[in-house]
Amino acid sequence: MGELRIKPGISASPNEVFGTLDSNLKLIESDCGVEIVYRGDEIIINGDEADRAANVINEMFTVVESGQSLDEQKVNYILSLSKDGISYTQSSLAKDVICFTHKGRPIKAKTLGQKEYVSAIKKNDITFGIGPAGTGKTYIAVAMAINSLKAKEVEKIILARPAVEAGERLGFLPGDLQEKVDPYLRPLYDALYDMLGRDAALRLKERETIEVVPLAYMRGRTLDNSFIILDEAQNATKEQMKMFLTRMGFGSKVIVTGDITQVDLPRGKRSGLIDAMHILNGVEGIAFCRLTDSDVVRHPLVRRIVNAYDVYQRRHPEWADEAHTEKEED
């Protein structure tokens, strides 16, 4: 077991670096398997990974000195990079991080398509993310929203989804209206809980800083200084899509996500997402990002499933019509 003594020599306040009740130091002790004592202006580190712990502490001082905030998520990310000998403050990886999960896992674009998607969101007021399941459309959109909220670029986040009856009848589900539609909103809650933690997400929801609502609840509102996401937009009708897009107010940003190969609308109802792709193409301030099977970041089998369905549908175009007919009969 080795002992290492360091004096960071930077003007950043140790209290800001170490966290409340030395919580950040405890994270380092747990991850590196060391003991850390702060005495005067000297930090004493004991353990086999004392060198890595010292590097992390020096990085933390540099981060605070540069004016950046230092929370649990960022400390965990600095620790994870240090395992590979990568410096957070010197690496371009830090710049690519959208935000961190509540467990400290960095959320970044993993494919070229996702990088273009993130870039489009930054540059445009309205961005459409269109692609198959597993391409990170919704997850990245929620991550961008949380990043904007933390940076105080917006005052609230609004997440909406059409409550389309895909094989079920809302009327037969137990509970009041909110309880009936909550299952349709579950993927949005899952993304929020992953990034913020369940308790923090529920607190923000109680304060109405974050709203998770069915699309129908958006009618009649004007949303200023908000980050607004419409998920599963392929199941919005053309009337609903126009209604949603015209809710946008000053200082707001909108992301619309959907998969045009998985439309659950009844036969005769045209998807508002497909209409928007034709009507709004080329409008200044609006970007369309098309993600493909190469952007699928779930289990490798998901990509093969997406490909198999695409191939089958091309060979049997009548299959989609049969699926709509079955929905109507149900």
Image (cartoon, grey):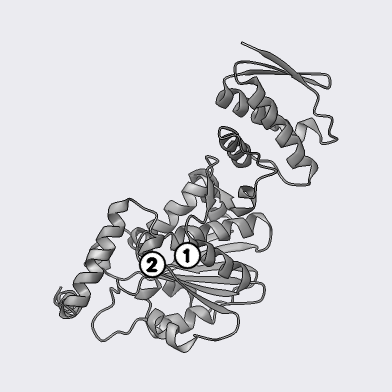
Q: Nearer the viewer, residue 129 or 225?
A: 129
Q: Is residue 45 found left or right of 65 in the rendered image?
A: left
Q: Nearer the viewer, residue 219 or 325?
A: 325
Relative to 23, say whether 104 is above or below: below
Residue at (25, 60) in percent of width and height: 305
Q: Nearer the viewer, residue 177 or 234?
A: 234
Relative to 167, say whether 31 is above or below: above
Residue marked by disc 2: 292
Q: Residues within 10 Å of mark 1 (few under 14, many from 20)?
A: some
Which disc number belongs to residue 113? 1
Q: Residues within 10 Å of mark 2 (few under 14, many from 20)?
A: some
Figure quadrant of residue 290: bottom left
Residue type, label 1 = Gly
Q: How many marks?
A: 2
Figure quadrant of residue 249: bottom right
Q: Secondary structure at mark 2?
A: loop
Residue at (55, 64) in percent of width and height: 118
Image quadrant containing the C terminus: bottom left
Residue type, label 2 = Thr
Labels 1 and 2 touching (C-beta < 8 A): yes
Which disc number belongs to residue 137? none
Q: Secondary structure at mark 1?
A: helix
Relative to 247, say whether 292 is above or below: above
Residue at (35, 66) in percent of width and height: 132
Q: Is residue 63 found left or right of 91 in the rendered image?
A: right
Where residue 13 appears, as percent x and y from the top left, is 81, 34
Where residue 203 appears, as percent x and y from the top left, is 55, 49
